[in-house]
Image (spheres, grey):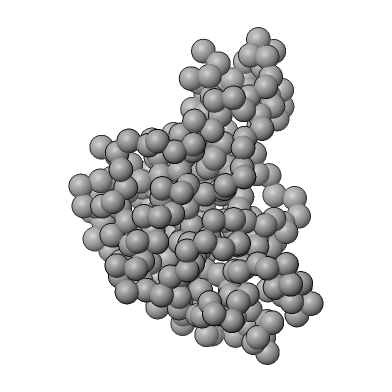
Amino acid sequence: MQRIGVIGGSGLYQIEGVNIKERKNLTTPFGAPSDAYLIGEFKGKEIVFLPRHGVGHRLLPSEINYRANIYGFKVLGVEWIISVSAVGSLKEDIHPLEVVIPDQFFDRTKGRISTFFGEGIVAHIGFRDPVCPVLSQILYEASEAEGARVHKGGTYVNIEGPSFSTLAESNFYRGLGMDIIGMTNLTEAKLAREAEICYATLAMVTDYDVWKEEDVDIQTVVENLSRNAELAKRIIGRAVEKIPVQRKCICSRALKDAIITDPSLIPEEIKEKLRPLIGKYIE
């Protein structure tokens, strides 16, 4: 059965309607994922759900083990990941409680590990278009069908956090033409592409960031998170039905010409460590 991953962001820790069949705790070569993976059936497809920050929201954005999370999805046979993310708006016409399906990212993090490679193996993936166009379109159409005001495309600037931006930073990002601001999705997108998993972001807007607000009011953010989570669940439900069985996008073959290290020189322990990702290219 086709497996579709869902990464739950702030305020989204489970999906009603999913018949949970298994709770899977994994240990990966990169350490422990954020929490157990919940595997269940939903509308004839298998859903693998992972709360990004752990149940109860225990992990800072910079504490999340992104490599373990994505590696775990790969090992579990996931080919598509819908990533739900709470974001702030950097544009006047992107309002709180609206939805954005970004097609670009801009990195402002400060040292997160965003690759599975190194230690004797080098790979350079293409990342001009960092999200899956097929999955993004499906999310856009599902959002429209649910009556959401949805913006197709836009740039998500990924800051380190956990603090929100200063006024100078917020205005700087606006001056660069950024659309929304968050703390998590770029690292996921890079790793998903290396793992040849289709990835797209369902960005749920909670606030206007500090360029317009006197300050980001956490109480308002939490209230909007709750309202956004209900909408996100409905959108995901619609989207899952439309995801095709066969993948024809670049995501499914991202590593085909990306590994440049001579296979005979790759250490055996690294081959074994990365076998779920690179096995078909080094055998």
Residue 246 position within the rendered picture, expressed as x and y whole percent measured from the top left: 32, 35
- The answer to whether residue 15 is visible is no
Q: As displayed, is residue 228 above or below residue 33?
A: below
Q: As displayed, is residue 36 above or below residue 204?
A: above
User: At 63% across and 24% down in the image, what residue appears?
Assistant: 259
Q: As displayed, is residue 263 above or below residue 44?
A: above
Task: Describe residue 234's horizontal placement relative to residue 153 as left or right.
Answer: left
User: At 49% across and 38% down in the image, what residue appears?
Assistant: 251
User: At 54% across and 80% down in the image, what residue appears?
Assistant: 93
Residue 172 is drawn in which quadrant? Answer: bottom right
Residue furthest toward the bottom? 214
Task: Describe residue 5's horizontal placement relative to residue 57 as left or right.
Answer: left
Residue 260 position within the rendered picture, expressed as x and y whole percent measured from the top left: 67, 22
Residue 107 position within the rendered picture, expressed as x and y whole percent measured from the top left: 69, 55
Residue furthest toward the right? 168
The residue closer to the viewer here, 62 or 229, is 229
User: At 26% across and 56% down in the image, what residue appears?
Assistant: 18
- Quadrant that contains the N terminus: top left
Task: Describe residue 81's horizontal placement relative to residue 45 as left or right.
Answer: right
Residue 105 position within the rendered picture, expressed as x and y whole percent measured from the top left: 62, 56
